[in-house]
Amino acid sequence: MASRKDTTIFYQEQINICKRHFNAEQFGRLMYALFEVENGNDPEVDDDIAVAFEFMALQKRLDREKYEKIVARNRKNGAKGGRPRKNPENPNGFFKNPNDNDNDNENDNENDNENGSQHDFLFLGSFNNVKLTKAEYESLKSTYERTNKLIDKASMWLRTAENDVPDHYALCIKFADNDGWPKKPKIEPTEPIRILDPIDPKEQEERVRDMKRRLSGIVGG
């Protein structure tokens, strides 16, 4: 199996965004620059791909730091003889419940189960870290223009945020309010057409005769 040093990771949503905004030549230059980052270099890039490069390079550096922490932790546990055996009274496998939140697998499970199964949510944005229910996503789409760009902005902010934000729907609305994000026009319901009851033919004839009498009186007078 290849080690982390022999591999590079690209997120599918990042690739999708690049395909929408870059041609093949720009995309190639971006990939080449990101491979240089993997090799520990700091390449210079042209202005037309600079913004995308900065965000994707940041993601790669954060991924590398996360991987190095895992390696260091595993090396430390290995020096101690490995992780303690699990026991029925304490399924965590520790003599006391740990307060260490650096376990990536435990954090991932906690995030998935905090408000229900992972399948109950959509993970959106440039870094797939904006967690919304389907109803919340549909609400944003029906309220704001360019909804995906709004979610991308929240995603980029979350990626470097120091504190955990539990309500990503409220975060998107906050960004929209602060930036004056354009809203979709509301479609007012049309007033129903009122159809009057048809006039009885005899009554209609009487009205015509009455109108003729009035006209003749006016003309004759």
Image (cartoon, rainbow, N blue to C red):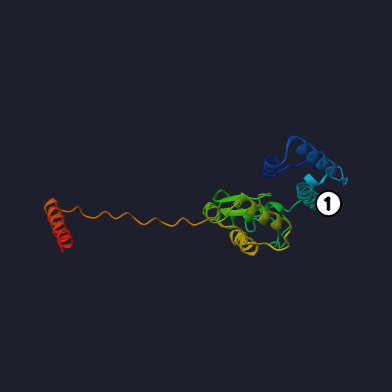
Nearest the camera: 218 or 67?
218
In the rendered image, the residue lying farthest to the front is 221
Residue 100 point in image, percent of width and height: 73, 61
Q: Nearer the viewer, residue 23 or 196?
A: 196
Q: Position of residue 128 (x, y in %)?
A: 66, 49
Residue name at image x 15 percent, y 56 percent = 212
Label 1: which secondary element:
helix
Q: Position of residue 15 (x, y in %)?
A: 70, 41
Left or right: residue 44 versus residue 124 is right
Relative depth, front residue between 51 and 118: 51
At 79% from the left and 39% from the top, the residue drawn is 31
Image quarter in which the C terminus is found: bottom left
Image coords of residue 201 (percent x, y) = 13, 51
Count of number-bearing discs: 1
Badge 1 density bin: few <14, some 14–19, many ≥20, Cα 10 Å: few
Is residue 7 visible in this depiction of the protein?
Answer: no
Instruction: Look at mark 1 in the image and give the residue it sits on.
Output: 79
The answer to which quarter of the image holds residue 92 is bottom right
In the displayed structure, would residue 113 be above or below residue 39?
below
Q: Amino acid at mark 1?
A: Ala
Is residue 208 something one can see in this rendering? Answer: yes
**Left or right for 184, reference 204:** right
Quadrant where the N terminus is found in the figure = top right
